[in-house]
Amino acid sequence: MKHLLLSTWHFGRLANEAGWPILCDRERSLLDVLTVACEAVEDAEEVLTVGRGYPDAAGMLSVDGCIMLSPR
């Protein structure tokens, strides 16, 4: 099977570099890939708009995204 990991934002390279080894590991799930990739961006201090990023209008840090898994 051929693999593809695609990101569109400037910090996508961080996500791809973290997620790629997991994607190539047949023992890991796609959910593992997504989790590791997202965590890498959230933990990157140079990325100011995700994770520890900018506060919302109320001055609070809002969740930027989530991973949802369908039961099917």
Image (cartoon, rainbow, N blue to C red):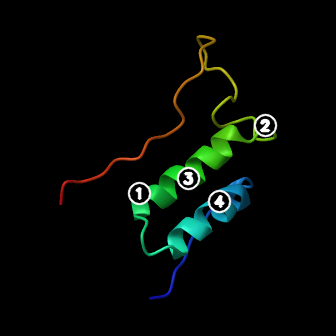
Looking at the image, is mark 4 or mark 2 nearer the viewer? 4
Q: Position of residue 72 (x, y in %)?
A: 18, 60
- Based on the displayed image, in which of its 4 quarters is residue 66 positioned? top left
Residue at 42% over, 70% down: 27
Farthest left residue in view: 72
Tell me whether circle 4 and circle 3 mark residues in contact (CB < 8 Å): yes
Tell whether 34 sits left or right of 17.
left
In this rendering, the answer to whether 7 lies above or below 58 is below
Mark 4 / mark 2, whichever is N-terminal: 4
Farthest front residue in view: 27
Q: What secondary structure is found at the residue carrying circle 2?
A: loop
- Cα distance in 3D space between marks 2 and 3: 16 Å
Mark 3 / mark 1, whichever is N-terminal: 1
Mark 1 / mark 4, whichever is N-terminal: 4
- Cα distance in 3D space between marks 1 and 2: 24 Å
Q: What residue did someone put label 2 on?
A: 45
Farthest bottom residue in view: 1
Let me know if residue 36 appears in the view.
yes
Let me know if residue 8 appears in the view.
no
In this rendering, the answer to whether 49 lies above or below 10 is above
Q: What residue did someone put label 4 on?
A: 18
